[in-house]
Image (cartoon, rainbow, N blue to C red):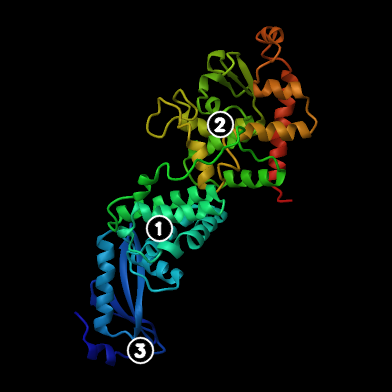
Amino acid sequence: MALTEMAVKKAKPLEKQQKISDGGGLYLLIHPNGGKYWQMAYRFEGKQKTLSLGIYPEVGLAQARDRRDEARKLLANEIDPGAVKQAKKASGILLSENSFEIVAREWFIRHAPNWKENHSSKIIARLEKDVFPWIGNIPISEIAAPTLVSVVRRIEARGALETAHRALACCGQVFRYAVATGRAERDPTGDLRGALPPVRKDKHFAAITDPKKVGELLRDIDGYQGSYIVKSAFKLSPLLFVRPGELRRMEWSELDLDKFEWIIPAEKMKKGVTHIVPLARQAVEVLREIQPLTGHGKYVFHGERDHDRPMSDNAIRSALRRMGWANDEMTPHGFRAMASTILDNMGYKQEWLERQLAHEEPNKIKAAYKREQWRMYLPERVAMMQAWADYLDKIKSSEK
């Protein structure tokens, strides 16, 4: 039965909290101390939620119903009214539900729990510093390419070209979220291809070689919340430091877990020479754990949809980005440089490292000889790979 203004006014507190329903999810919550609060119960993406709509008598019955109806309109457009309220609170100012800043903050609140903390803090700081002051109060559906290009060029003008590219990419994600939630018709960032000059990339692959940072990365890998197949490949990347393409195309027929060996046939190697990768105890543990899942097929790390193909060549790179490791900080190929640099500093012989990395022998005569010597330095490399895995365990367990 719907409430009346008189019924709300005369409602008395009891020893316990009581709820008096008005319909459509709206109800009056009365505390034992006499406080009266308007709330709305609703479900979003299968989860039961509660939205606070104000305190009686500052907010009367009619106004509470209006706020309920506004929330129900948002729900009809697949928008969480609770996220909109949080976004408004975070902005510190009263903006339209369709302004760029409100939509962006709602998008951020929705996705931030899946990001590494330092990654999410950089994203919101970039928006607050470089984007919101210029277009935050403009309805998102009214923002066109010329307006947006002026925002990113302002960032470029201070010499922060890479930040300008990242800000533009972030805006694109906000616009696509607005399209998905019915508050914009298109993403104008697609019209800005070529508007910014490309960022000059170093010819070398970015890699972490500081042991403290390596330990942080290893802990992040252990805490990765994505696909189990990707996580398993991710865990093997620092242990084996093979080329990313070699790892993702690993086949069960190439492995001998009892002998702790992975033999990659010549036709799959970049230099056309058979390569043997000694497997440390930790690597074998990872492989035995995933064997019940993928061991019946060809590939150790098969695709999510097509089990007859290896996983995507971008899977580990995407996992690094998702955890907040920038492309100029660490790449899938960077695990090779990480291992090579640290093992060299630990005193291991260069020829052992070169053989383990399967680098090309510059002396062609020696190279022809070594084609028949693919087990060269094998006892030394077996010991080195186990010592490397033990070292990674050590720095992973210590933040010093």
The crowd level at tag 2 (other Cα within 10 Å; few <14, some 14-19, many 20+) is: few
Which amino acid lies under the numbered mark 3 shown in the image of this protein? Pro
The residue under label 1 is 107
Left or right of residue 56, residue 6 in this image: left
Q: Vertically, is 339 above or below 199? A: above
Q: First in sequence: mark 1 or mark 3?
A: 3
The residue under label 3 is 13
Q: First in sequence: mark 3 or mark 2?
A: 3
Element under disc 1: helix
The residue under label 2 is 288
Tell me the CA gap for discs 1 and 3.
Answer: 39 Å
Q: Position of residue 51 (x, y in %)?
A: 35, 71
Tell me the CA gap for discs 3 and 2.
Answer: 62 Å
The reply to whether residue 21 is in sight is no
Give whichever of 146, 172 is nearer the camera.
Answer: 146
Which amino acid lies under the numbered mark 1 shown in the image of this protein? Trp
